Image (cartoon, helix red, strand yellow):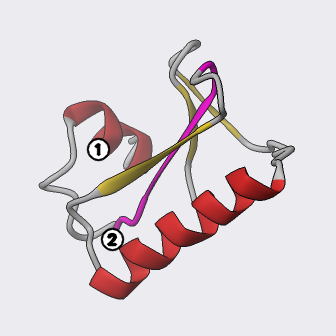
Amino acid sequence: MRIFDADTDKTLKDVTLYLKYEEAKELYDSIGSLLEKKSFDEHEHINDATYEREITVLLYDEQHVESLNERSKKIIHPE
């Protein structure tokens, strides 16, 4: 698992999500869609009602990161 804060360009070790029911349902559906497709080339965005906050989720395989952008590759393999 990697948690990335795009505003600070740093990874985080711990976060707490406060989700409304609709947001939790959207997150659940988005993750379900990625799992169902077994897609490592797609990502999903979950926004609040005002589009001020966003969660981006994706599946990754540490051995196959070639489809990710360079920043994502460095987040997964920081060495």
Q: Is residue 54 magenta?
A: yes
Q: Is residue 74 above or below residue 62?
A: above
- At 74% from the left and 43% from the top, the residue drawn is 13
- At 29% from the left and 44% from the top, the residue drawn is 73
Depth check: give the residue in front, 67 or 46. Answer: 46
Identify the mark at residue 61; answer none if there is no mark.
2
Q: Quadrant of the N terminus?
A: bottom right
Residue 72: image quadrant is top left
Q: Is residue 53 magenta?
A: yes
Residue ID for mark 1: 73
Query: Is 46 on the left-hand or right-hand side of 20?
Result: left
- At 61% from the left and 60% from the top, the residue drawn is 27
Q: Amino acid at mark 1?
A: Lys
Identify the mark at residue 52; answer none if there is no mark.
none
Badge 2 crowding class, 10 Å Cα cut-off, few under 14, some 14 to 19, many 20 or more, is few
Q: Is residue 34 above or below residue 36?
A: above
Picture coordinates of residue 78, whole percent (x, y):
42, 41
In magenta, the rendered stretch is 52-61
Element under disc 1: helix
Depth check: give the residue in front, 6 or 52. Answer: 52
